[in-house]
Image (cartoon, helix red, strand yellow):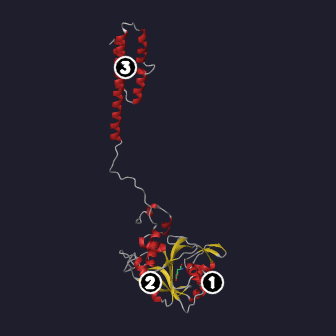
Amino acid sequence: MNESLERLKEEVAGRLSRSVSEAEVEQLRVEYLGRKGTVTGLLRGLKDVAPEERPQRGEELNRLRAFIEERIAGCLESLKAEKRSKALTEERVDITLPGSRRERGRVHPLTMVVDEIVDVFSAMGFEIARGPDIEDDYHNFEALNMPKDHPARDMQDTFFVAAERLLRTHTSPVQIHVMESRKPPLQIIVPGAVYRHDDDATHSPMFHQVEGFMVDRGIAFTDLKGVLTHVLRQIFSADARVRFRPSFFPFTEPSAEVDIGCVICDGKGALRDSHACRVCKGTGWLEILGSGMIDPEVFRFVGYDAEKFSGFAFGMGVERIAMLKYGVEDIRLFFQNDLRFLRQFPSF
Ligand code: DAH
């Protein structure tokens, strides 16, 4: 091969061996073998070569071109291999890392507690009833034996929507709706949201209650005690202590508040460090619900004969039960939708 072609060959080989990217190799290919490339130019110049030298010159140029093509292919091959092995070490996939799982939703703790309460009552044959969140004064107060000037209205800081319309302050008005439209025997529970103008660590302007009542011939206070004791032992624990304490509600007579032995200090009133238990305020008891025998005056409002029928009723706060069951100290946590809080409850 003539000397200048030999030099050209070495130049190409040297440049290719130093190139570090496919783009660079491509650039060299264009520079030598492209339409305006050096070797292409030389091949084109063959026609000006003396006829007797042409075959040899042609063969030499063809060999040079083949050499360059081969080197380029080899160069691209090794660049690719290099790239691949670099990726294999640098971009190594750690197959022991946990995969990204699909997030599963879960039931809100308040829904869980309501479901549990409903299940316990359903097993005893109670039906579920519901009523409107926006009530009239008559169903929320009047027919529950709380006339306009009744001091008991003061305890239920009411949100009024209009003169005689309000956000129900309790689920008790559903008692009235049900009794207005049906006759005994009745065994009903009413889960639902209620509203009061109140907002601190243990009170929320919107919270939930489960109201319940049972009306038939011959229902007595023993029925109330039996049903509620069973329910509280199902919800808290089989050996929970239950206490009935005389109280007053305008819609029941007699009335009782029901307490359970404090679930935090185990009814002792004090913690192991002998500090008074904050949750039961040292009493050893927690008030869980209000109850009583339905007042004959309420029966009069719905047109029931109080000589024939009797019944008991009760109302419990869902948030309070959930707070005690799960040791939640601030009621507002239930409504902030903070996933760190909600994820602590079991999913199923
Ligand atoms: N409605 C009462 C409240 O919100 C709770 C209650 C007490 C309901 C006694 C009753 C009952 O049915 O008999 O505070």
- Judging from the image, what secondary structure is the residue with disc 3 in? helix
* Image x and y of residue 248, in percent: 53, 85
Q: Amino acid at mark 3?
A: Arg
Q: Is residue 200 above or below residue 229?
A: above
Find residue 147 and name its label.
1
Report whether the residue tagged 2 is closer than 8 Å to ligand 1: no
The amino acid type found where label 2 is placed reads Val
Residue 65, numbered label: 3
Identify the image quadrant of residue 121.
Answer: bottom left
Label 3 vs label 1: CA separation?
109 Å
Mark 2: which secondary structure? helix
- Location of the N terminus by quadrant is top left
Q: Residues within 10 Å of mark 3 (few under 14, many from 20)?
A: some
Distance of label 1 from label 2 (alpha carbons): 30 Å
146 on left or right of 220? right
Q: Secondary structure at mark 1?
A: loop
Residue 88 x, y percent position in the rendering: 33, 40
Q: Quadrant of residue 269?
A: bottom left
The amino acid beneath tag 1 is Pro
Residue position marked by numbered label 2 in the rendering: 227
Verify CB contact (< 8 Å) between mark 3 and mark 1. Answer: no
Residue displayed at 42% across by 70% down = 326
**In terms of sequence position, does the residue under pointer 3 or pointer 2 come before the other?**
3
Q: Earlier in the sequence, mark 3 or mark 1?
A: 3
Tell us which disc is closer to us: 3 or 2.
3
| Residue farthest to the bottom, as pictured | 307
Residue 283, visible in the rendered structure: no
Q: Position of residue 204 (x, y in %)?
A: 53, 70
Q: Residue at 35% of width from left, 35% of height from top?
A: 83
> Total label count?
3
